[in-house]
Image (spheres, rainbow, N blue to C red):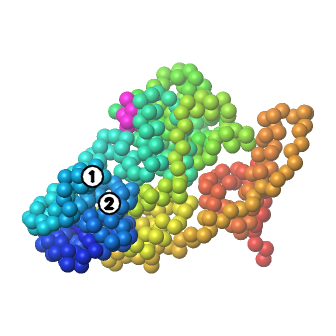
Amino acid sequence: MKPKIFKALIVDDEEGMRGVLTRLMTKINFEVVTASGGETALQLILSELPDVMLLDFRMSGMDGKEVLQAVKYIDPDLPIIMITGYADISTAVEMVKAGVYDYLAKPFDNNDVIRIVQRAVSERNLKKKFRNLSCQFGESFCLREMMGSSEAVQELVVKVNKVANSNFSTIIIGETGSGKELVSHAIHHASHLSAGPFYAIDCGAIVPTLLESELFGHEKGAFTGAVDEKPGKLEEAKGGTILLDEITNMPLDAQAKLLRVLQEKEMYRVGGTEPIKLDVRILAASNQDLTVAIADGTFRSDLYYRLNEFVIRIPPLRERKEDIPCLVDRFMKSAFVELNKEITGITSSAMEVLLAYDWPGNVRQLRSTIRRAVLLADKRITEKELPQLDTQSTKKSINLIPDEEFIWDDNYSFKTIMRQHTQVIERKIISQVLILAKGNKAKAARMLKIDYKTIHSKLKLLGISNVGEEKW
């Protein structure tokens, strides 16, 4: 790959000053983008992703202080060098408190400008390298580097730190693609078990008849095809952490065995008679609230209460859109390495499209979109390289459930009545989404943010068939 070319954003309402600073930055091989006002500068930060910013303090429209506050919200780590003709002590103190990296008084020495800019970029790079190194050792603020710096992510980091230092079983709730496994890794690496192994098992991707063998292992001859003994992942994860992803897909008999393991801290291999002591932390993840699965009878309430010592909910990307520019930057750089290609950035109009979309596939969908855009782009990502993102479809509201009169029947228990009413609601929701998807079950599963196996089991359980399919 080509050596890194740093980018400077120069913001000044005087054309002459922009020209002077541009020549200085070009002299030290910086790429330069300029803005004559604060509003334009904020758009360029999103599209150009500069490494350093030179900002005039007194400007018409948004002044330097207002721009500084907005930039700190968009990119808190961007070093800002304030240029002012009013460099009194009180102004300098005010700027430093507000988060300015350094300041220059007019008229300035050109060598001072170059020295401060190079130092700022060097320190920014060192911080990035330190964060990447810390990620390798499992520091929890790796989540900020991987997910963004929004308030929602900050709260998530606090929760991860708190639960990591305990031995609590933890349930992680989040939509598909929102980062459940990433959060699980962060908990593991920040805990006292970080030296041990980490295993993730997708309970929906393993055939139910093989899931118990995968979890608990089996003895030789335990079943047809068991030609050798095999330890399960719970056994192999001794002294570490195991993530049970999409745990609502686990069969009820396997749930019963898992509950017994959690209660007794020991397990038996399939076909085995000797107990095996366990020392492993269990994390469970799901893209739906487990209480819903309890209500429809597909998840054991006693297992839920055993696992439910601590709950972490990951906000979907549509609720933390301020993280999108940071994620776009990270995904572009990752694609540069993968594709051995580097482009200069993304246009402001393309970034606006990304910010307007609600991302039903969350961070995973955004990553795929940027990866494809880097492949297609020549110099920078424009709207042309982005797929047709329907910014309206995700905002549509559907009147799924009309008001109904509730009728009490004392012949049935509360649990039975709740399950019946839940199934009525589920049947209406799934039927209407299938109509929107024209009977395409895979598309309906994506719209509902559940996996393909779950929608098939729901259709069978609820007696739904041929809904939405086009008649020929």
Is residue 349 in sight in this rendering?
Answer: yes
Which amino acid lies under the numbered mark 2 shown in the image of this protein?
A: Lys
Asked if residue 292 is positioned above or below residue 196 in the image, the reply reads: below
Is residue 117 in sight in this rendering?
Answer: no
Q: Residue shown at 36%/71% (left/top)?
A: 61
Tell me the element at label 2.
helix
Residue 14 percent coordinates (x, y): 24, 76
Q: Residue shown at 53%/71% (left/top)?
A: 389
Q: Which range is magenta?
A: 188-194
Within 10 Å of the Cα at label 1, are there few (<14), some (14-19), or many (20+) other Cα atoms? Answer: few
Q: Are marks 2 and 1 in contact (CB under 8 Å)?
A: yes
The answer to which quarter of the image holds residue 210 is: top right
Pointer 1 residue: 94
Which amino acid lies under the numbered mark 1 shown in the image of this protein?
A: Glu
Asked if residue 245 is positioned above or below residue 438 in the image, the reply reads: above
The answer to which quarter of the image holds residue 27 is: bottom left
- Residue 200 covered by magenta stretch: no
Quarter the C terminus occupies? bottom right
